[in-house]
Amino acid sequence: MSPNFRPVPRELESDVVEVASNIWTIEAKDYVCYRPPMQPRYPYTHRSVVIRLKDNSLFIISPIKLTSNICNEMNTLGEVKYLVSPNHLHHLRLGDWQQAYPKAKLYASPGLVSKRKDLTFDKTLSTDTTEPGWDGQIEQCVFGSGNGWFDEIVFFHCESRTVIFTDLIMDFDSSIFSPLSRVTTQWNQMYKDTPRGVRLAHTFDRVLLRDSLKTVRTWKPQHLILAHSPWLCLDGEEQVANFLDSVFDWLEPKPFVVETVMTATRFSLLLFVVLPIIGLIVLVADLIYPRFVKRGESQ
C-alpha cells in the first residue's frame, strides 16, 4: 500500500487550505532560507496550522508571514486567541501576529523565552498537560526532556484526529535544490525522515522520545501534517501508523550494551568526523562558492 500523501492544490484560491473539520493549513508562497547547524543554507517550504476550537477561537501553530489576505481569512474563521511555537526554531513571525492580535495569548516552546526577550509570553509549554483553553480538544506531547537543546511539542487535534509535527519529521522538495544541497540533504535524511541532526541532538534522551511516540500512537491519528513538505497531509489511520513506524525506526530499543556502544560511537563520529566534514561543506557552499560566482559575473 503506497502512502496517501494528499497534494497541495495546484491553483490555490486562498492561502488557507482546509485539511479536515475545523483544521486548516496556511501555505507560504515563498521559502524560508535557513541554515541548520553545520549545514548549507536551504530553502524550506513551510506552513502554519490553524485549529478552530468550540468557542470559535483559533489556535495557530508556527505562525508564518502575516498578510492582509491571511488576516481576512482568520477574521472569517474565528478569533485568533492562541499563538504557539512548537519548537525554538519556529518563532520568526510571532511578533507580527502578536502585534496584529494583541489580545491573543503567546505560548513558547522550551528554550524560546531566553531567545526572544523582545516578546512577552504567557507561558512555556514544557509538559504534556494541556491548557484549560484547549483541554479536551487538542492534545500535546513534548518530545524531549522539556528543557533540552531541541525539544518539540507535537499536537493532536482530537475532532479531526490530526497529528502535527514540525521539525522532528521533514520532507524536502529536491527539485529546488542545487546538486550540492541534494547530496547534503540526502545525507542528513531530510526526505520523509527524521533529520540526522535531530537524531544526534537526542542521543542521550531517546527513552523519553520512545515514551512520547507511544503517546502519539495511542491517539490513532487519521491525518498527519508536517511543517516542511511539498504535500498537504498524509491520510488514513493505517498509513499514518506505518509512516511513523518508518520515520522513527531509529528509536527502536536495543540491548543496554549495544545502546551504550552505539551512543558512544555516534558522539565520537559527530565530534571528530561529521562536524569537520560538514563544516568544510558549509565553508564552500555558503562562503567560497557565492563569492566565486559573483566574481565571475562581474568580469
Image: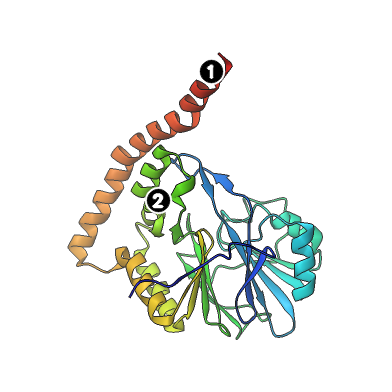
Q: Quadrant of the C terminus?
A: top right
**Left or right: where 98 falls relative to 38:** right
- Residue 250 image point, x, y percent: 30, 63
Q: Earlier in the sequence, mark 1 or mark 2?
A: 2
**Residue kind at label 1, given as amino acid type:** Arg
Task: Determine which residue is flagged by label 2.
Answer: 197
SS for tag 2? Answer: helix
Q: Are marks 1 and 2 in contact (CB under 8 Å)?
A: no
Q: Quadrant of the N terminus?
A: bottom left
Query: Disc 1 or disc 2, which is closer to the eye?
Result: 1
**Residue kind at label 2, given as amino acid type:** Gly
Residue placed most toward the observer, 3 or 34: 3
Q: Is residue 108 visible?
A: no
Task: Determine which residue is flagged by label 1.
Answer: 295
Residue placed most toward the observer, 2 or 138: 2
Residue shown at 24%/49% (left/top)? Answer: 265
- Residue 111 image point, x, y percent: 56, 56
Q: Residues within 10 Å of mark 1 (few under 14, many from 20)?
A: few
